[in-house]
Image (tube, grey):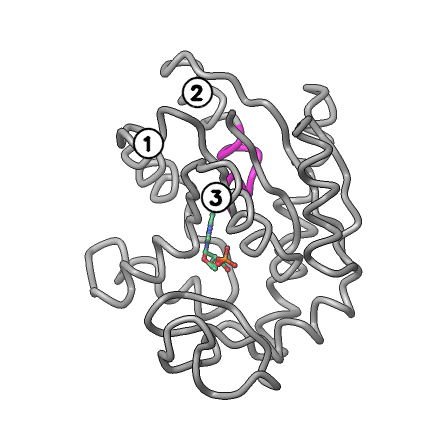
Amino acid sequence: MNIVLLGAPGAGKGTQAAKLVESRGLAHISTGDILREAVKNQTELGVKAKGYMDAGELVPDDLIVDLMKERMEQPDTSEGVILDGFPRTTTQAVALDSMLSELERPLNAALLIDVDAEVIVARLTSRRMCRACGHICSVSDGQTCPKCAGEMYQRDDDNEETVRNRLDVFDKSTAPLIDYYQGQDLLVRIDGDRDPGVVFADVEAALGF
Ligand code: AMP
């Protein structure tokens, strides 16, 4: 089963993806995580991507499509993938369709996790991430990761100005994908402004589990 998770930054895509990995054993592919790792390791991709990411802008489509082509050929994707943060533009969505058709795999659903913009600003500016394992918490949960005791930090792009820019970028570049997947009869809209466990029950139901 191959699933696209759509939604503004901070809508809870990563949280829902982690739950799906745990319950269904699908491979989780987050382009944001891949890019952050590349920035940390100062790879060629990381050096090219950093400026865009810090400003809350999208990394150019050709870089993203190349990295996704390589990632989709890894053996762990053969049982199915949860795509978190990709595609983010119509160009990327068209590229995904051709990647999947070359691999002779279907796209089963595009789940839109829907959350009001002001709720997202509040969520993201208080979000903290574990440097060691990537676990996500709120600033009120303390400075130590509850999962691995690693150090919690605030992502460079989770300050209010950048968050608002990321939301504008979502409206302009990514929101058109809602129509794109509606047109393919793959879109399911899920209210993401609820407890993550309640949202997940809807995610599972939407996927027929
Ligand atoms: P995320 O962790 O998904 O919020 O992504 C963090 C940042 O990485 C975004 O604000 C973009 O700068 C970049 N990024 C992640 N995925 C993509 C993508 N599919 N296309 C373009 N840029 C991306």
Label 2 sits on residue: 100
Q: Is mark 2 within 8 Å of ligand 1?
A: no
Task: Determine if the magenta segment contains residue 87.
Answer: yes
Residue pictured at 56% horizontal, 36% vertical: 4
Residue 60 belongs to the span the image colors magenta: no
SS of the residue under disc 2: helix
Q: From mark 2 to mark 1, how far is it between C-alphas?
A: 10 Å
**Quadrant of the rendered image containing residue 14:** bottom right
Kindly report which numbered mark, 1 or 3, lies closer to the viewer in this rendering. 3
Q: Nearer the viewer, residue 150 or 125?
A: 150
User: Within 10 angstroms of label 1, few (less than 14), some, or many (20 or more) residues?
Assistant: some
* Rendered position, 74 above or below 154: above
Where 181 falls versus 159 (above or below)? above
Residue 207, position as x, y percentages in the image: 66, 29
Position of 94 relative to 147 (above/below) = above
Q: Residue at 79% of width from left, 49% of height from top?
A: 191
Q: Quadrant of residue 64?
A: top left
Residue nearer the viewer, 58 or 15: 15
- Looking at the picture, which amino acid does disc 2 mark? Leu
Q: Looking at the image, is mark 2 or mark 1 earlier in the sequence?
A: 1
Q: Amino acid at mark 3?
A: Val
The residues tagged by marks 3 and 2 sit, at their Cα atoms, a distance apart of: 20 Å
Q: Which residues are magenta?
A: 85-93
Q: Badge 3 is on which residue?
A: 21
Q: Residues under labels 1 and 3: Cα distance?
A: 21 Å
Q: Position of residue 52 (x, y in %)?
A: 43, 62
Q: Which residue is mark 1?
A: 69
Crowding at label 3, few (<14), some or many (≥20) Cα neighbours within 10 Å? Answer: some
State yes or no: discs 3 and 2 in contact (Cβ < 8 Å). no
